[in-house]
Amino acid sequence: GAGVSQSPSNKVTEKGKDVELRCDPISGHTALYWYRQRLGQGLEFLIYFQGNSAPDKSGLPSDRFSAERTGESVSTLTIQRTQQEDSAVYLCASSLLAGARVLTFGAGSRLTVL
Amino acid sequence: AQKITQTQPGMFVQEKEAVTLDCTYDTSDPSYGLFWYKQPSSGEMIFLIYQGSYDQQNATEGRYSLNFQKARKSANLVISASQLGDSAMYFCAMRLNTGTASKLTFGTGTRLQVTL
């Protein structure tokens, strides 16, 4: 596609429910990243995919968070048993190659946990 | 561990004037890159400018320039001839050239308001 597409754009859920956030990177981009942005804060790195493998998962805050990528395209970030502190905007970015200077970001998925 | 500090939570500038957004960084790695991103109210992050730690000249991209002072570990963004469309959040970020490719560490951002 023309840009990085994320869905849903907004998600409100109840504490304890599971949520899935989806990212469609730019076609042909091999590298994909997930970041989290809490209100009033900068972005925090969560996980990086090169192709379908994840060489760096160091930013995932707990084992309730997981992500996968299939077919070197779509990625899904799953948060199990959501907590109120998971409320944030989750941003996905992609780049043609790992180490590329420019990442293209999506508009994000805003998650609100009640 | 690397850290980015942006001390200005908000800035105002009049249209057509220049403005400087401050950024300092901390790392013990000698090889790194510094980035500035713009985040309008729509939410997406837009890449503006890049400076490598070994670059001799300050980076420029149109109305954007990066005032890189390596000894002071500062990488301030200068926007010349401000326009109303420049109103947005601006984030400074750093990437080490070791470890995860393109893993960026961000500051907390500066909200810029351009006024008439």
Image (cartoon, rainbow, N blue to C red):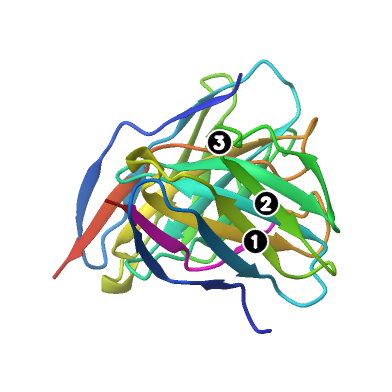
Say the numbered circle drawn on residue B68.
3
Residue A82: x, y in percent? Answer: 43, 45
Q: Chain of mark 2?
A: A
* Residue furthest out toward the bottom: A1
Locate residue B64 relative to residue A62 in the image: left or right: left
Q: Residue A42's spot in the image, x, y percent?
A: 42, 42
Real-space CA distance between mark 3 and mark 2, rounded to the nearest whole angstrom: 37 Å
Q: Residue at x 75, y 33 (%)?
A: B54
Please tell me which residue lies in front, B109 or B13. Answer: B109
- Residue A57 is drawn in which quadrant? top right
Give the vertical position of A61 relative to A79 (above or below): above
Residue A112, compared with residue B32, is above or below; it is: below
**Which residue appears at 72% of the width and 20% of the height?**
B29
Pick out the residue farthest to the top: B28
Rendering coords of residue B28 (x, y %): 67, 15
The residue type indicated by label 1 comes to Thr
- Seen in the image, is B15 located left or right of residue A80? left
Upstream in sequence: badge 2 or badge 1: 2
Image-based side of A36 in relation to B20, left or right: right
Q: Secondary structure at mark 2?
A: strand
Q: Of residues A101 and B56, which is closer to you in this image?
A: A101
Residue at label 1? Answer: A76
Q: Is residue B22 magenta?
A: no
Highlighted magenta segment, given as a residue range? A102-112
